[in-house]
Each structure stands twice: as C-alpha cells, then as structure tokens.
Amino acid sequence: MQNDIKEVLYSEEQIGAKVKELGAQLSVDFEGRNPLVICVLKGAFIFMSDLVKAITVPLEIDFMAVSSYGASTKSSGVVKIIKDLDVSVEGRDVLIVEDIIDSGLTLSYLIDVLEHRGTKSVTVVTLFDKPARRTVDLQPHYKGFTLPDEFVVGYGLDYAEKYRNLPYIGILKPQVYEK
Ligand code: 5GP
Ligand code: MG
Ligand code: MG
C-alpha cells in the first residue's frame, strides 16, 4: 500500500498539529453556540473525530453521506445524498466538516440543501483545499492546508475505497489509477 504513494505531503504529526490549531480557533468562535457538527462521509471521518476532540465547547454531531465521484478521480458534477442527517438543522449553527474541497460542487450543493432547511448559520471547515480546481465560487471559512492540483489519498481520503487508513496525506502514483 505504501508503495503506491509517490510522495508524502503532510505527515501524521503535521496534520495533528494543524487539527489542534483549528480546534482551538473553533472553540473560541463557537463559544456559547452549541454547534451541530456535520461530518461529510466518508472522507472526513478521521478529520472529524480528531477535530471534535480538539474543540472544547459543547456541541452535537451528525453524519451525512454524499456521492459525487464514484470510483473516478474527477467530480461528475452530480451530487446525491446517500445518507441524510438524523436531526433537524432548523435554527442551528451548523459546522460542516469536509476532507477536501476540489471543484467545490459537492459542498455548494450541501450548503444549499442545509440553508433551505432553515439553518441559523452554515460554517465550513476543510482540512485540505485545492483552490486551483474550483469551478464554483466557494471559500471555506477555515482550512488546514492548501494542496497542489494532484490526486491525494490518506487520512480518510480514498482511491476506489482504499488508502483511507494511511495516517498521512500523500500523492498517489498516477500509474495506480491510469491502469
Ligand atoms: P468537489 O465536489 O469539491 O470536486 O469534490 C469533493 C469531494 O471529492 C471531496 O470531499 C473528496 O471526497 C473528493 N476529492 C476531491 N479531491 C480529491 C483528492 O485529491 N483525493 C481524494 N481521495 N478525494 C478527493
Ligand atoms: Mg468530502
Ligand atoms: Mg472518494
């Protein structure tokens, strides 16, 4: 599995430090707001679990699953809700936890859906951002790292459901998906 990685971009330690930093900032900014923290499955599951441990204010969590890529490395532009939230977002300060923003299509769709349900506010935190590939006008409120235009895996992110368990983020060798 490690052999399929061309280059490690950020180590487990570097990611851990950044997640603590984001958690500390969010703890200040969400003081007294009891946010509903929404994990966008599956890619954000590791970031979500590390991030909520670094947030010190009372919060609630829920999960949502959307699909946009299938087994490909490019967004299809078609977003589908695979698993919806269990709780209502009406009147809530919502914090969306994303793994990575690429075209921005998935997230802009998700923000629309949640706002139509009557949220009080929607805030986005993403661990990784690839701004060079954005096709919609969307800026995360909080972000961990800006990445080059390369397909990355690890720390929750997959290629064809593999590599999610790598503790670091790395670039996959092109020959792995060009087969
Ligand atoms: P977008 O709709 O912004 O193009 O893509 C959103 C989703 O596609 C991300 O949340 C992530 O699940 C997946 N994605 C985008 N870029 C990458 C990447 O470089 N590697 C992996 N593994 N997934 C990605
Ligand atoms: Mg995602
Ligand atoms: Mg994926």
Image: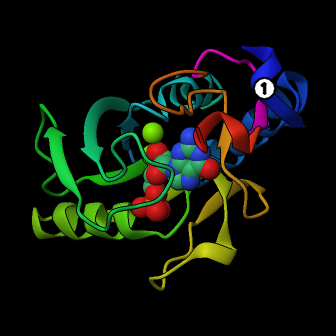
The residue that label 1 is drawn on is 168
In front of the other: 130 or 40 = 130
* For residue 51, above or below residue 107: above
Please rate how many residues cluster around mark 1, counting C-alpha atoms within 10 Å: few if below 14, some from 14 to 19, many from 20. many
Left-right relation of 6 to 49: right
Q: Hey, what amino acid is under mark 1?
A: Tyr
In front of the other: 61 or 40 = 40
Left-right relation of 48 to 106: right
Q: Report the image quarter containing ligand 3.
A: top left
The quarter of the picture where residue 154 lies is top right
User: Can you see residue 98?
Assistant: no
Image coordinates for residue 173, horizontal then vertical, percent: 76, 38
Left-right relation of 135 to 82: right
| Quarter of the C terminus within the rendering | top right
User: Label 1's element?
Assistant: loop
* For residue 130, above or below residue 163: below
User: For the view shown, which residue lies furthest in the bottom direction?
Assistant: 137
Is 52 magenta? The answer is no
- The total number of labels drawn is 1
The quarter of the picture where residue 37 lies is top left
User: Can you see residue 26?
Assistant: yes
User: For the view shown, which residue lies furthest in the front direction?
Assistant: 179
Specify the segment rendered in magenta: 164-172
In front of the other: 107 or 73 = 73
Q: Residue at x 88, y 28 (%)?
A: 11
Q: Residue at x 40, y 32 (%)?
A: 59
Image coordinates for residue 176, horizontal then vertical, percent: 66, 34
Image coordinates for residue 82, horizontal then vertical, percent: 16, 38
